[in-house]
Image (spheres, grey):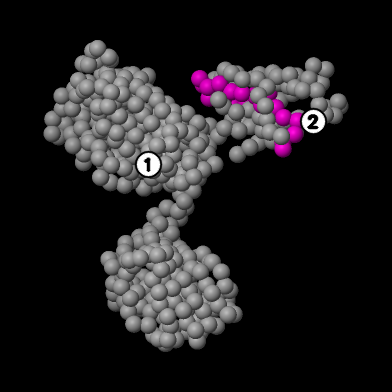
Amino acid sequence: MTQYMKHTKRTAIAIAIAITAGLSAASSAFADTTLLTFDTPPGFTVGSPYVSWGGAGFNFGTTSYDVSVPAGGFGGQYVEFDTNVDASGNIAIELTINMTTSGSSAAILVLGDNDGTEQGYQWYGLSSGPHVLVKALGAYGFGAAGTTNGLDLAHLKYVHLQGDGDPYTIQWQNLRLTGPAPPPAVVGQTVLVDFGSDTSFRGVSVVNPDVNGHYWNSVQPGAFFSNLVDTSNQVTTIDFGFDGAAGTDSYNGPAGATSIPPTPTEIAATDIDPGALGNLGIINAAFDYVNGVGAKFQIQQLDPTKKYNLTFFGSHKFNSDANTIYSVYSDSTYTTLIGRTNVNVFQPGSPWLHNRDQTVTISNLSPPADNIFYVSFVGSAGGDGFLNAMQISVVQQPQITSQSYNPATSQFTLTWTSAPGKTYSILTSTNLLSGFTTNTAGVASGGASTTTTVTLPTTSAGFLRVQQE
């Protein structure tokens, strides 16, 4: 988001201030359930066509199921899902098609569950072209009662695909149910990830909320984790999953030797400096770790309009490589590097002294085109890398709190909200079409608020931008 404030003086100079830097999490549906993608081979079984579809032509394309009805009129076909679908929690139906018609036609769906309850949805008056058709699941339509009242979203079994109207061809492309959208990310939203859980090898989960009142996501290889929660327990659209082999353990981590399962005494022996580690300084989060040679994972459903900071804590002793390298890529082949950092998981030359107080951060990462960060880690000499906990945080957006202009000196003084330890640049422009140039760089943060004064070019109009470096 960009904030502009116009400032005018009797000298007729006009200053528009643009503040940029901030970011937030993603926006996608929560609990979405795909019923049919109509790909080849299809994930469904078709029955005999009826009424006008008895004379229809059918074709399985690579991305659609095409039904051509040269005579037009009402008809359809029963389609059974290969496995029953649990779509609990969803609130709307979304159908993606491409319609070709000589006039006006309709797409119609009838969902059915295990006991024969049916609920119908219809979209009449469609012209030729692509359509994304949406209705609330409870919208009035038509249906049939089964042995139990109400459509059971937890046990969906089949759907009738139907059409009506003038001669038409429907390319059925995607059918899904969608849930309520999670709340948008707030400025500075933070997600905490604990590598290891109560169900991983010699692992423990963080008990939520932690001693700081924060909520965590305890993850492990072999599972995909949708809609991570942030520190305030708000659901986000950020998804997480490992992309290849990785191991989990706690042995020779910050707690030293551990048992199967770990004992309360061993967990309590976790040796870290909570103050130095900040949000990641939680015993259960630091206790266990994930490790591997080039271990990989994906952080998905990021907001393309935002930037993110990734903070890593790795700690282990008596392994071959003292240093672990964390790399972030923009592609699924893990070749296009967009950020890298490293940390000593134990003190070089003293492998019994594990890292207890150091985190490292890759800052101001912009999501690539697919809104996924591809992250890998490895020992600096090619051995195992280690990762105990991670923080995903939205870059906080500066907000101007005051501004003033002195026409006699062409000096502009402004104050904005800032993050401790960061630096900022002031950029200026006389014409937004020609872009900005740096006026002043390396302005050190004053803490929660920063004030600086810059000298502006002598022009009748100008623009300023403050951005975090």
Which amino acid does the dot numbered 1 rest on? Thr
In the displayed structure, 35 sits above or below 273; it is below
**Percent of width and height locating residue 452:** 66, 19
Image quarter of the N terminus: top right
Kindly identify the residue that appears in the image at 42 percent across and 53 percent down.
30
Kindly identify the residue that appears in the image at 38 percent across and 79 percent down.
77
Q: Quick one: label 1, few (<14), some, or many (20+) residues within 10 Å?
A: few
Magenta residues? Answer: 414-433
Q: Is residue 148 visible?
A: no
Circle 1 — which element?
A: loop
Q: Is residue 17 visible?
A: yes
Of residues 34 and 371, the one drawn nearer to the viewer in this rendering: 371
**Percent of width and height locating residue 237:** 43, 46
Q: Dots 2 and 1: beta carbons under 8 Å?
A: no
20 relative position to 339: left or right: right
Image quarter of the C terminus: top right
Whole-Å distance between the Cαs marked 2 and 1? 47 Å
Q: Nearer the viewer, mark 2 or mark 1?
A: 1
Residue that mark 2 sits on: 461
Kindly identify the residue that appears in the image at 28 percent across and 23 percent down.
381
In the displayed structure, 408 sits above or below 227; it is above
Of residues 398 and 330, the one drawn nearer to the viewer in this rendering: 330
Circle 2 — which element?
A: strand
| Residue 49 marker | none
Kindly identify the residue that appears in the image at 31 percent across and 24 percent down.
380
Which amino acid does the dot numbered 2 rest on? Ala
| Residue 333 marker | 1
368 relative position to 325: left or right: right
Mark before the other along the chain sequence, 2 or 1: 1
Of residues 17 and 429, the one drawn nearer to the viewer in this rendering: 429
301 relative position to 84: left or right: right
